[in-house]
């Protein structure tokens, strides 16, 4: 018998710890890394990684595959970008616990918050669960290309306990709060990696209602945190508008100090947040100096939307002429859009904001005519564009209005043009503010939203962007080292969630790896696919430069193509390195 199942020979090893890279081999046996360095012996399979980077598989801690993971084994698009572990159930939305009469309600909540087509969720999910432990059992039955772990979502818990009483502003009784805490405790004991909630006006159901956690009291949130503390592990995750009167950091600090557990929040430059990002970080560090463990979840680029005629959002969707054709099949829409008379009529109209919630009108106006903040996604687009690349600047240079330039841009490529609008994380017109945060131990790379915002973004490609932009190509400011980038997307993200068995290339760790041609790494052009159940649409983006992705010692992707292998499964609770005697 061969000494190893697989040996990766002669690669540039970046082991995930932040240590300097070195040239060596990796030997894999029984799904675990058995040797690193100069590996002697033979293997059933060998891969020549000369001139390539060998790194751990990416650990993505902020995704929304809660429905997709119940039917889809490939787990695209995250799996296309070297991700081997995803954590879902973020932002307080998910599908367990689920009373039989609340299925549609939970779907509409997810559709509104995360822009996942409700028809796809309704057709794709079997709902062969009610409680959260039963949902974990359902997830465990389907093998995948990646491992999945999940939070207990606040929205589902509240809906399960309050039933028809769940409305924005609903105040639970003491008994209700205890029931919610018990559900969270049971979920974490069954294997959930934490609990999540959302407290931002940007998160609404498809009916326009605020998500359940938005108006939750401090008492409710602390009680749930204490329930996790009784189990002894788990991450408390939230998104919030950080209104000062809510004293978010006060109760986050209290939960963390009482329980010893980490609390993580979405740290963004956002027009919806009352506290600027710098103030959020200062408040977090003040609590941490007092014994808390609060971690800022940061994105690596502007969080925004990619707009297209067939997407969920585009600049002209509130104009009467578009509204008149919004429900037509795409072929008929395209014919109208390419008609000069239709174009002239639409461009002469004003937007109708009458159906937009008052607190979202400002954002809607930026979408409709914020040409100085919108950018043409040409083939070499790098997600850190300058002002002279904006639609406003290019329209002025072309001698046309921003409206006309944007309209014509969207009509390119037979109606498949794209516009990029970074609503969040681009207040200064650059990403300089992220340089220091990526060097901080109290931040974690996050917020990819893999599996969500299907018609507007594709930030599941964030790990690839990290390599292409932050490590190799960035010209507008500082870069980060390859060693730092790998550590942040592997070791750091895994440790936050107690996944101590992955994110490092060393004996005993799970054999999750990427073999990367760093010179070729590149994001592909986005496209809209209609491949979800019931023909649901999603924005997809592939990558060049991943020679192989390996999960549990099995090659799952070669040169971007799925091999059909599904060695991934469900993560239940914290994980530790399984120490075995290294192969001779």
Image: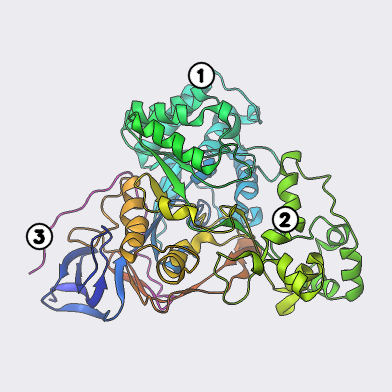
Q: Residue at x 30, y 67 (%)?
A: 55
| Residue 130 seen in the figure | no
Q: Is residue 375 left or right of residue 484?
A: right
Labels 2 and 1: the sequence-earlier one: 1
Q: CA distance from mark 3 to mark 1?
A: 52 Å
Which residue is label 1 attached to?
175
Which residue is label 3 attached to?
581
Circle 3 SS class: loop
Q: Quadrant of residue 468?
A: bottom left
As rendered, which of 374 and 526 lies closer to the eye? 374
At which x and y percent is residue 578?
19, 53
Which residue is label 2 attached to?
367
Start and end of the magenta stretch?
557-584
Labels 3 and 1: the sequence-earlier one: 1
Q: Name above or below for residue 177 compared with residue 327.
A: above
* Crowd band around label 3 with a 10 angstrom C-alpha radius: few (<14), some (14–19), many (20+): few
Q: How many marks?
A: 3
Mostly what secondary structure, the magenta segment? loop
Circle 2 SS class: helix
| Residue 211 seen in the figure | yes
* Crowd band around label 2 with a 10 angstrom C-alpha radius: few (<14), some (14–19), many (20+): many
């Amino acid at each position: 018998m061969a000494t190893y199942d697989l040996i990766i020979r002669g690669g540039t090893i970046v082991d995930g710890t932040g240590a300097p890279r070195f040239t060596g081999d990796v030997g894999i046996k029984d799904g675990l890394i058995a040797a690193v360095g100069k590996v002697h012996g033979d293997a059933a399979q060998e891969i020549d990684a000369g001139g390539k980077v060998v790194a751990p598989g990416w650990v993505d801690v902020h995704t929304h595959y809660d429905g997709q993971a119940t039917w889809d084994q490939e787990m695209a698009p995250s799996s296309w970008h070297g991700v081997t572990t995803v954590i879902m159930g973020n932002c307080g939305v998910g599908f367990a616990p689920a009373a039989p009469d609340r299925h549609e309600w939970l779907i509409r909540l997810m559709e509104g918050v995360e822009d996942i087509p409700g028809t796809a969720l309704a057709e794709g999910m079997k709902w062969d669960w009610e409680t959260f432990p039963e949902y974990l059992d359902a997830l465990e039955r389907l093998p995948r290309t990646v491992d999945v772990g999940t939070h207990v979502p606040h929205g589902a818990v509240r809906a399960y306990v309050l039933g028809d009483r769940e409305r924005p502003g609903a105040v639970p009784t003491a008994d209700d709060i205890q029931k919610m805490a018990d559900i969270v405790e049971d979920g974490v004991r069954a294997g959930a990696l934490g609990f999540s909630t959302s407290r931002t006006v940007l998160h609404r159901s498809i009916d326009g209602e605020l998500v359940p956690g938005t108006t939750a009291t401090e008492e409710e949130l602390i009680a749930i945190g204490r329930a996790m503390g009784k189990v002894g592990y788990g991450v408390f995750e939230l998104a919030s508008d950080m209104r000062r009167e809510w004293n978010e950091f006060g109760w986050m600090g209290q939960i963390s100090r009482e329980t010893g557990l980490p609390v993580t929040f979405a740290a963004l430059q956002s027009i919806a947040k009352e506290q600027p990002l710098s103030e959020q970080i200062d408040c977090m560090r003040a609590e941490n100096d007092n014994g808390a463990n609060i971690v800022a979840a940061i994105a690596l680029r502007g969080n925004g939307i990619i707009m297209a005629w067939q997407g969920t959002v585009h600049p002209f969707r509130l104009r009467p002429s578009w509204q008149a054709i919004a429900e037509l099949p795409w072929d008929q829409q395209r014919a109208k859009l390419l008609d000069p008379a239709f174009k002239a009529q639409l461009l002469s109209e004003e937007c109708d904001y009458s159906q937009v919630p008052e607190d979202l009108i400002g954002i809607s106006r930026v979408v409709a005519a914020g040409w100085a903040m919108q950018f043409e996604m040409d083939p070499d687009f790098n997600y850190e564009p300058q002002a002279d690349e904006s639609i406003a600047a290019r329209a002025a240079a072309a001698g046309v209005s921003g409206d006309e330039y944007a309209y014509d841009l969207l009509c390119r490529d037979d109606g498949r043009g794209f516009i990029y609008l970074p609503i969040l994380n681009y207040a200064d017109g650059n990403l300089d503010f992220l340089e220091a945060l990526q060097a901080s131990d109290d931040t974690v790379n996050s917020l990819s939203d893999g599996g969500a915002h299907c018609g507007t973004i594709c930030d599941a490609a964030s790990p690839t962007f990290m390599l292409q932009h932050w490590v190799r190509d960035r010209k507008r400011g500082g870069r980060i080292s390859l060693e730092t980038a790998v550590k942040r997307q592997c070791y750091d993200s895994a440790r936050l969630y107690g996944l101590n068995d992955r994110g490092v290339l060393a004996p005993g760790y799970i054999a999750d790896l990427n073999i990367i041609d760093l010179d070729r790494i590149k994001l592909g052009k986005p496209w809209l696919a209609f491949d979800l159940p019931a023909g649901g649409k999603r924005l997809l983006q592939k990558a060049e430069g991943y020679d192989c992705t390996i999960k549990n010692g099995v090659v799952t992707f070669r040169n971007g193509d799925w091999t059909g292998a599904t060695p991934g499964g469900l993560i239940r609770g914290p994980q530790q390195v399984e120490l075995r005697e290294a192969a001779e």
